[in-house]
Amino acid sequence: MSVSRVHGGGPFTADLELPGDKSITHRAFLIGSLSGKTVRVIGALDSADTRSTLGALEALGSGVIRRNGGAIDIVPAAWCSPAAPIDCGNSGTTARLLAGLLAATPISAILTGDASLRRRPMRRIIDPLSAMGARIGAEAGTLPIEILGGGLRTGTRHELAVASAQVKSAILLAATRAGVAVSIHEPGPARDHTERMLSVAGRPVTRLPGGWLELEEGPRELSMPNELNIPGDISSAAFLFVAAAITGGRARVQGLGVNPTRTGVLDLLGRAGARVVIEPEDDRAGEAVATVTVEGGELRGFEVSGGEVVRAIDELPAIAVLAAAARGRSVVADAAELRVKESDRIRGICSGLAKLGARVEERPDGFVVEGGGRLAGGSVDAEGDHRLAMAFAVAGLAARGTTDVIGAECVDVSFPGFWGILRTGIAPGSAP
């Protein structure tokens, strides 16, 4: 287990283009496998999570060709039952979206993952996929699960208990691969990357009044473009933006995905007093793209709840650090979903920030931070959670002395270049 040391210092500054969005990369690989021709994915994120998806596709029989310059070719092929369980690593997106595709495929497969992923809830996808006709064995509602797919029914209707892009996507991908119709009701806004990419592939999802989505019957083989260019990851950029905001610096990220279901962090930065400038660029892979600049300012407390939580769910660890630096009280509510991520992020972020001197109160569905005082350096354990590791590192930039982040290697799950960017973006910087 590695330790990275962060030194509190001057303003954080960065001007760069980040690797591709993790959520969109996963979908480009998986949906690309349904195409009638080879699909080249440009700008894909190369991380532990996305490598899990590629490994799963290879285990099932799809071709994966890694080109010079980082492009990935996805070569469609008939899937066969794998000889061994498919290891999804730490990637919930891999497990849940792949389960949807397997539910519609007349083969058997077992999905498993690391210790963290095996604790995460899978009943939320098992139940709707079973209702569609898939046979899924799971003793505890968690991984490992065994899927015997094929023969899905058309016209099933699903009312989701929580707004979840992964659950919605599992159902949509199952219906797409089976060529059947499906209707989904989501209780609130969730990421719509799957819907956007299906539209690019010729299987548009219709959004109806009252929160319903409908996918009509259609061909099982999709008409994908020859190339998909993946925009940068706003969830990774969020940590750089918060670093700039709390140190009085400036972070400018070009080619960034600014899907409206993902830009809650930009709204919160602006509300807290940071200066946020968004300059639109040409769309990529059906997604809005922009150059985004964030500069520090006089930070003040804020509140986050309801649908805004869904639009910033993966960025809330970074938002907690922003709250610790902002003068006054900040409240995050309606965020109980954080407890079933790669770790219990509510407990983890509260415990870690408290060790750095923040005044933070843990609540069942969120936390309260009394911010404005300067943090003190210390030692904090990321508990194997990539977003907690990055949050504690960013907090260390604004703390007195040095901050040691234990388990620093876990950032490779989503942002392999994070520590290098942090070292070069601040004086005196951080040391590995």
Image (spheres, rainbow, N blue to C red):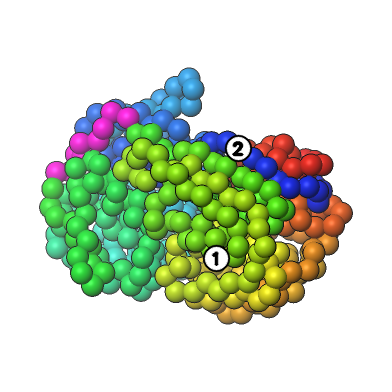
Residue wearing tag 2: 15
Task: Give left or right: position of 55 versus 194.
Answer: right
Q: Is residue 220 magenta?
A: yes
Q: Amino acid at mark 2?
A: Asp
Give x and y (percent) for residue 218.
13, 48
Say few, some or many: other residues with alpha carbon within 10 Å of mark 2 (under 14 / 14 to 19 / 20 or more).
Answer: some
Residue under the image location 29 percent in, 61 percent down: 129
Give x and y (percent) for residue 83.
40, 40
Give x and y (percent) for residue 246.
69, 57
Mark 2: which secondary structure?
strand
Q: State the quadrant of the C terminus.
A: top right
Which residue reaches farthest top?
68
| Residue segment shown in magenta | 219-227
Comes first in the chain, label 1 or label 2: 2
Residue under the image location 87 percent in, 54 percent down: 401
Residue wearing tag 1: 271
Callout 1 touching callout 2 (CB < 8 Å): no
Which residue reaches farthest right?
401
Does residue 88 appear in this view?
no
Residue situated in front as seen by the camera: 293 or 66: 293
Task: Give left or right: position of 425 versus 25.
Answer: right
Whole-angstrom CA distance, mark 1 to mark 2, is 23 Å
Residue under the image location 83 percent in, 62 percent down: 376
Name the image quarter holding residue 348: bottom right
Q: Amino acid at mark 1?
A: Arg
Residue under the image location 74 percent in, 74 percent down: 359
Does residue 370 appear in this view?
yes
Measured along the vertical axis of the image, is residue 108 above or below residue 59?
Answer: below
